[in-house]
């Protein structure tokens, strides 16, 4: 059984439509795939219809941008009620904050002599529902300023970079409560990758578990084998769910092929049980034999 619990469609910063993403998951031999676009549930309905067509089981989720002790931390929220008002209010605040900063980032790039106009960004971002830093990165690639998104972040867009602009993100403990109140299962995404490792030591993770954290993403390309071993041991000590995922972004990120990292069936079963016990109306679409 191949289970991939973290992928992005072009509703956020992936490159495939939700429908194509789900069909690609089926074609890649996955039995279960999760759609986890950044800060939005807008891709869910299309993905759900496609899952029925493609015969792949679908977990509906979100990757929420939060802040913890001053660092950006991504929180996967599995199977929350998309109709929950408090959850949607937070998501729209995040999305508005992200979109509000884009014009400022473009202005900073223009001050650096790069022709990063609103029009060029619109042409580059296509029909994405959420426009953010990855789209500015793609624009820098299209303009020939950098080779790829990674270089765009490293040289211009990462925290502290010359075109970085801060934005709103909810505090992680508060978001854990919002997600759980919506029936969702909160799992830390790539906790020891991308600049959040220093704020997420075992003590901090234990504290977050006491505030409702259900699991951690261990098998992720941002984690080397030693990091995975240490995180797995922490998860075991704290009785947290362990997930593994591709963090697929279509052609937007190389090396993150669908199913390149996977989650064990018993861990998915724990997530499904927890969502049900939290009273979420959102269930797994399609059948998966998790034994
Ligand atoms: Zn992430
Ligand atoms: Zn992601």
Image (spheres, rainbow, N blue to C red):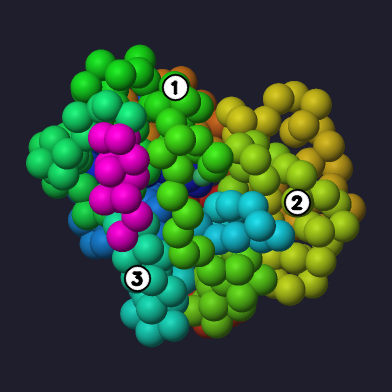
Q: Would you say the magenta stretch is mainly helix, strand or loop?
A: helix
Give residue 93's position: percent from left, percent from top. Answer: 38, 71
Q: Is residue 101 visible?
A: yes
Q: Which residue does the image show at 73% across and 73% down from the upper left?
A: 211
Q: Which residue does the image show at 34% across and 44% down from the upper left?
A: 105
Q: Is residue 283 visible?
A: no
Viewer-side label of 1, 3: 1
Based on the picture, tell me whether residue 101 belongs to the magenta stretch: yes
Does the beta carbon of the residue at mark 1 sit less than 8 Å from ligand 1?
no
Pointer 3 local density, CA inside 10 Å: few below 14, some 14–19, many at least 20: few
Q: Which disc is residue 205 wearing?
A: none
Disc nearer the start of the sequence (1/3): 3
Mark pair 2, 1: CA separation: 25 Å
Residue 250 occupies which quadrant of the picture? top left
Q: Is residue 107 above or below residue 282?
A: above
Pointer 1 local density, CA inside 10 Å: few below 14, some 14–19, many at least 20: some
Question: Image check: 246 left or right of 93?
Answer: right
Q: Which disc is residue 92 wearing?
A: 3
Q: Which residue is mark 2?
A: 199
Q: Which residue is mark 1?
A: 151
Mark pair 1, 3: CA separation: 29 Å
Q: What kind of element bears circle 2?
A: helix
Q: Is residue 183 above or below residue 192?
A: below
Give residue 199's position: percent from left, percent from top. Answer: 75, 51
Give residue 166's position: percent from left, percent from top. Answer: 47, 54
């Amino acid at each position: 059984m191949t289970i991939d619990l973290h992928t992005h469609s072009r509703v956020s910063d992936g490159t495939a439509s939700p429908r194509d993403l789900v069909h690609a998951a089926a074609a890649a031999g996955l039995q279960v795939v999760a759609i986890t676009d950044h800060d939005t549930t807008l891709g869910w309905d299309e993905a759900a219809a496609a899952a029925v067509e493609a015969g792949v089981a679908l977990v509906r989720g979100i990757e929420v941008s939060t802040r913890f002790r001053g660092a950006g931390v991504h929180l996967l929220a599995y199977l929350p009620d998309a109709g929950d008002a408090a959850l949607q209010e937070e998501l729209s605040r995040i999305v508005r904050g992200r979109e509000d900063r884009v014009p400022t980032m473009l202005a900073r790039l223009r001050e650096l002599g790069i022709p990063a106009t609103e029009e060029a960004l619109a042409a580059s971002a296509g029909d994405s529902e959420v426009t953010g830093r990855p789209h500015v990165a793609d624009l820098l690639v299209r303009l020939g300023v950098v080779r790829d998104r990674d270089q765009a972040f490293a040289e211009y867009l990462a925290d502290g970079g010359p075109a970085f602009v801060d934005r709103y993100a909810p505090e992680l403990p508060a978001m854990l409560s919002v997600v759980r109140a919506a029936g969702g299962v909160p799992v830390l995404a790539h906790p020891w990758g991308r600049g959040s490792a220093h704020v997420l030591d075992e003590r901090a993770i234990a504290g977050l578990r006491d505030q409702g954290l259900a699991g951690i993403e261990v098998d992720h390309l941002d984690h080397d084998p030693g990091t995975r071993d240490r995180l797995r041991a922490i998860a075991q000590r704290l009785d947290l769910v362990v997930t593994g995922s591709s963090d697929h972004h279509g052609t937007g990120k190389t090396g993150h092929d669908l199913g390149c990292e996977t989650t064990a069936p018993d861990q998915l079963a724990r997530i499904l049980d927890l969502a049900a016990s939290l009273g979420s109306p959102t269930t797994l679409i399609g059948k998966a034999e998790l034994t």
